[in-house]
Structure formats: C-alpha cells, structure tokens
C-alpha cells in the first residue's frame, strides 16, 4: 500500500504552511499589530474570562459577536457570519460556491492554496505595471470559466496598494461571478465596499480582527446578503469559533477606541518608515495603504538583506521568487523602536555592501 495513491490530486504538491525556523527578537513578518491589548481592554478581558462557561460548547450562532459586528459595520446580523480567521471563511466560500477561482497575481497566497484544497480550478491574472488591476482580463477569465469566484484583496497583500473602485465595480457588474472583496486591511486604508452590499447581490466582503491586535484569537467575519450567508452556514463547522474568541472579539469591537488609537499610530509610523526607506540606496519601496510595506532590492538583493536582518535579530518576509515579486521583501510596521531598529539595520546593510 502506498499512501501516495490515496492523496487527492491538488493536495500532493502542496507544502504545509511553515515559518522559517530562525531566532529573532523583532518580529515584522506577519503584519500583526505590534502593540499588546490596551490596559482598559485587558482588564475587561480578565473579568470576562473568569466566568466563561468553558464546559459548554460555544454558541454556534455567535449571537453576541455578530451583534457587535453589526454595531461596528452598520449592517443587520443576518448579513453576518463569523469564521476561525477569514482563512476559514475563504475555504467555506469555496466549499459552497463556484467551480473556478480567479484572482489577480500576486495576491494573498491562501486564495490559490484553498482553491487547490477544495478541488476548484484556478486562474491568476497578472497585475500590470505598478501592480495595477487588469479588470478586463479578470472579467474575461470569469466569463470563460463559469461559475466563477473572483477574489480581490484591496488593499492587496503583499503589494500594499488599493485598486481603483471603478475597476472593482466594473468587475462586480460585468463578470457574472461572485466577487469577494477582502478588506483585511480596511482599518488602515479606510476604504470599504460595504455601501455596495445592498446594491450588488454577487458581492461578499471579508474582514479580519487579526491585523487589529487579535491575531491569536483567529476571528474573521463575512458580510453578504442573507441568501449567501445561509449557504455558508451550511458548510461551516457548527462550533467553528471558540467561546474565548467570541467573547473577547465582541468585547473589543464594542469598545474599539483604544484599538483605533493604535491603528492611527501604526498608520503614522507607516508614513515615517516609508520616508526612511525612500532615502536608502539600493532599496525601492512601494506605496502602502496597509500595515506593511513591500520593498525591492536588486542589489544587494532580497536574499542577502533578509539573512543580514536575521543576523541582526529581525524577521521580515522574504518574498523573492521568479515573476512580479523578484527580489521583493515585505516588512510589517512595528512599534517606533522596532521600526527604528530595522531602518538602522537596513542602513548598515546597504552601506556595508558593495553597492554604495
Ligand atoms: C488579504 C488577506 N486576507 C485574509 C488574511 C487572513 O486573515 P485571518 O488571520 O483572519 O485568517 C490575510 C492575512 O494575512 C490577508 O492578507
């Protein structure tokens, strides 16, 4: 018997998700919020935790959390479902809908990975110069491969830019596909597609609390018409979101001001880091509407910079691969001290290398 013979097509060539096994003191690789939960919220969390009924299953309807999301987004609760991170919701969408997944490339890796896991066919449409969206080609690909799901992260991970609203609206109107607008970075860009939900029945919006300081809780949510939510609720596991995550997420969303302050600080820091990167020879950086910045270095090169940063105890994401991300690195915005540390390390690396 060969285990290989049992592995489904599409799974065989996938690699398990891994982070590099290196030691570091500054972590800027996963676009998390670098700040701990503010004291006021931490005190509330401690109080709530003392009385959680952990002997019982979590609320399968996540009523309290969905109400908190409704208040936060201005939508009714029947337009909302929650997931164990938005990753899980992406998977649920692919389990419930479509046969083909269309997405711009490069984008969030989980779109093609989960398309393979769920057995859907996939088509990546390259972004153009300066990572601009090829709306025409996306519409064409969806029309040729019905029924399609089009995933668009705006702002986009890992490029950091937002796509023009007119292009996204054209895709929603003309593609004949279900269009998933992933707003994982909404709080850093301030741009949302929520106002379109009432108008376009084929629109789904995804959000996450991971970038807002709750990555460890794994909470994502989806906004769509009740007829779409109903189908998603058929495929999602009944107790997908644990009690602790539901309670803390609801608590944070209903007292969001302390997190808003952290987000403002991260956005201000993003602009500072961006200015500092511009001053560095050998590194090109791209405009960002997120909590990370994409940069490129032909010389001294992404691999060299990444390993020198690791030697300095700083972990960022090395995206270097053939194609649009050749020689690219992605750095999350950290605390003021962390940002100062990476800028000074990059200065040293660039000036110590042969290029200057
Ligand atoms: C565009 C996009 N969508 C979704 C996610 C995943 O979010 P979650 O942590 O809620 O699964 C990420 C995380 O990096 C992302 O960049």
Image (cartoon, rainbow, N blue to C red):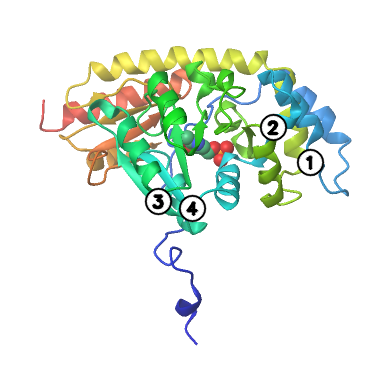
Residue 31 visible? The answer is: yes
Question: Circle 1 — which element?
Answer: helix
Q: Using a 10 Å C-alpha cutoff, classify the residue at mark 4 as few (fewer than 14 neighbours), some (14 to 19) or many (20 or more).
A: some
Q: Earlier in the sequence, mark 1 or mark 2?
A: 2
In the picture, the quarter occupied by the C terminus is: top left
Disc 1: which residue: 243
Question: Circle 4 — which element?
Answer: loop
| Residue occupying the far bottom of the picture | 1
**Residue 186: x %, y % from top left:** 52, 22
Do residues under tags 1 and 2 come within 8 Å of each other at their CB atoms? no
Disc 2: which residue: 80
Rendered image: mark on residue 198: none
Which quadrant of the figure has residue 226? top right
Q: Earlier in the sequence, mark 3 or mark 2?
A: 2
Residue 105 visible? The answer is: no
Query: How far apart, in angstroms, are the residues tagged by discs 4 and 3?
Result: 9 Å
Whether label 2 lies within 8 Å of ligand 1 gets the answer no
Whether label 1 lies within 8 Å of ligand 1 gets the answer no
| The one of 322 and 355 positioned closer to us in this rendering | 322
| The one of 287 and 331 positioned closer to us in this rendering | 287
Q: Using a 10 Å C-alpha cutoff, classify the residue at mark 2 as few (fewer than 14 neighbours), some (14 to 19) or many (20 or more).
A: many
Q: Nearer the viewer, mark 1 or mark 3?
A: 3
Which residue is at a point 15% across and 33% down the rendered structure image? 353
Q: Nearer the viewer, mark 4 or mark 3?
A: 4
Disc 4: which residue: 99
């Amino acid at each position: 018997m060969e285990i290989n013979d049992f592995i489904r097509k599409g799974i065989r060539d996938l690699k398990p998700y891994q982070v590099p096994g290196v030691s570091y003191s500054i972590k800027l690789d996963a676009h998390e919020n670098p700040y701990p939960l503010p004291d006021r919220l931490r005190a509330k969390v401690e109080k709530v935790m003392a009385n959680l009924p952990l002997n019982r299953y979590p609320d399968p309807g996540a009523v309290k959390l969905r109400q908190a999301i409704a208040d936060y987004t201005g939508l009714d609760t029947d337009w909302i479902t929650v997931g164990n991170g938005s990753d899980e919701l992406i998977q649920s969408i692919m389990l419930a809908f479509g046969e083909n997944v269309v997405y711009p490339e490069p984008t969030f890796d989980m779109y093609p990975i989960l398309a393979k896991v769920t057995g859907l066919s996939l088509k990546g449409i390259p972004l153009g110069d300066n990572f601009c969206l090829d709306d025409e080609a996306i519409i064409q690909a969806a029309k040729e491969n019905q029924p399609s799901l089009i995933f668009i992260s705006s702002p986009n991970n890992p490029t950091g830019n937002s796509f023009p609203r007119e292009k996204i609206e054209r895709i929603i109107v003309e593609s004949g596909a279900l269009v998933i607008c992933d707003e994982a970075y909404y709080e850093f860009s301030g741009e949302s597609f929520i106002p379109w939900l009432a108008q376009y029945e084929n629109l789904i919006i995804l959000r996450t609390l991971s970038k807002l300081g709750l990555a460890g809780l794994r909470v994502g949510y989806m906004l769509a018409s009740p007829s779409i939510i109903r189908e998603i609720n058929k495929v999602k596991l009944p107790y997908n979101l644990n009690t602790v995550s539901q309670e803390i997420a609801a608590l944070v969303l209903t007292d969001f001001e302390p997190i808003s302050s952290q987000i403002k600080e991260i956005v201000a820091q993003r602009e500072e880091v961006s200015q500092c990167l511009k001053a560095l020879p050998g590194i090109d950086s791209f405009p960002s509407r997120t909590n990370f910045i994409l940069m490129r270095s032909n010389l001294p090169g992404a691999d060299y910079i990444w390993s020198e940063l690791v030697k300095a105890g700083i972990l960022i994401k090395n995206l270097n691969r053939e194609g649009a991300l050749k020689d690219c690195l992605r750095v999350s915005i950290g605390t003021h001290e962390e940002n100062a540390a990476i800028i000074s390390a990059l200065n040293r690396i660039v000036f110590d290398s042969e290029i200057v």
